[in-house]
Image (spheres, grey):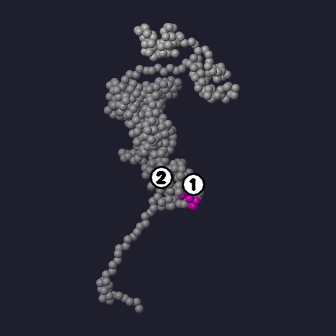
Amino acid sequence: MITNQQYQRLMSEYEKTGKIVVSAMKADVHPQTAGKYLDAGKPPAELQAPHTWRTRPDPLEKIWEEAMAMLRDAPELEARALFDHFLARPDSGLEERHLRTFQRRVRHWHALQGPEQEVFFAQERQPGALLQLDWTYAKELHVTIQGERLDHLFCHCVLPYSNWEWATRCISESFLSLVTGLQAALVRLGKSPPNLGTDNTSAATHDLEEMPGRPRAYNADYLELCTHYDLSPLTINVGCPNEQGDVESLNRHLKRRLNQHLILRGSRDFASVEEYDRFVEGVLQAANAKRQQRLAEELACMRSLPATRLAEYREYAPVVSSQSLIRVRKHTYSVPSRLIGHTLRVELYEPELKVYLGRDFLFCLPRLRGDRGALVDFRHVIVPLLRKPGAFINYRHREALYPTAIFRAAFDRLVSDHGERPGVIEYLQVLKLAAEETVEKVEPLLRVQLACSGKWLATSVRDQVAPSARQVIELAGLIPSLKAYDVLLEGGEVAHAG
């Protein structure tokens, strides 16, 4: 059987030349086949006889009628699940090798009798008219920082017309991550479009309590952000991610591209999050380099950015409690005890907290995720605990005083060997040593001590980590003067004991 294109070419060439062999050669068919179609004067579809016979027995004959009935009742049934259902019945006559035949039959049934499917309509995008923003989880990349798993998301911004994109690492779908991600993308572009599209994220919208079931309203902070950059906010319908299909599609492509570069890199471990951020930036720049022509069209239609950027943090003024703790957004953080009673200034960023006393910067703290939690650093409370060791056993945040599982095992061993109070004191001395040195220095020595059967004390660990240097006293050399001895004799002042 020849194709319709070959048939059309054959008929056209034959009308020009009247020669079967020449026409057949130009249509790439055998001359005998060409003669058959020229004599019939019918296209292949009309000339072919209907195929009404089978060349082998139908392996689905026993179960197909029942299978169709089940598909009519539940069209969402998958072919593999339905096949396994019949395969488990001894009288079905099915074997594992019949799976592909069954899958093709089910697919054909869906095309002829199945329900209507959802249709996606390609949209005409205007250059520079819209920026779409969305978050995507990146756990499947399996990135680690010095061996520790990095749980993170990307705040992903996309221009649908050119597919230009920029992604910023974040830890949650918060308003601060939205501000940080959006401003990073706009600064990269150097301009801003008139419209910003998002889904109904809580960072941008909220439910109206007085009107349940009505469309969600925009948050005041989000409207302030849009006003600053002269953006018109747009949201999609709830539960309809396909309405923001451009960024949803590029979410997958971004992670696929990052995964390919991680494979080529040969390692998914990075020395720091800054190194990982530079890696992601390099991948994005390489992808955007191929979109410059259409991006130029978009930039020509965009507006200039305002002279200032919005602050990418929220500011709080907690008072340090007598427990050496502060509370920020329902989370508890420890600080050094010397700050008790002081009012601090805390700048809450997406990944961290920056702590100030007045205008003096003190330190950074990693930001806690979730609704509630506590981050207590044993270095902040170890000295007060050594003064009050009895407070350790019932301390509310005691679990934070075990930096690793090895430290917890060391505490249990010391209490078992020396009793509760002496064991607590010894463990607090170990913890003080870890604060003075590092957890990484102390932990291997604790492993060694735990492997030994005898009792041990914190001093034995300290002597290995930081042995005290022996003080050697150097005496000045004594050289007696004989002349002074003669003067002493001549003076007659020497007394002899009789």
> What residue is shown at x 34% (from left), y 26% (from top)?
293
**Quarter-of-image position of residue 222:** top left
Q: Toward the viewer: 120 or 78? A: 78
Residue that protrudes farthest toward the bottom in the picture: 498
Tag 1 secondary structure: helix
For residue 233, above or below residue 337: above
Q: Amino acid at mark 1?
A: Asp
**Quarter-of-image position of residue 292:** top left
Q: Toward the viewer: 438 or 360? A: 438
Seen in the image, is 246 located left or right of residue 92? left
The residue at which mark 1 appears reads as: 412
Residue 452 magenta: yes
Q: Toward the viewer: 373 or 89? A: 89
Residue 281 percent across, percent down from the top left: 39, 36
Q: Quadrant of the C terminus?
A: bottom left
Tag 2 secondary structure: helix
The residue at which mark 2 appears reads as: 439
> What residue is shown at x 59% (from left), y 17% (from top)?
113
Q: Closer to the observer: label 1 or label 2?
A: 2
Residue 445 magenta: no
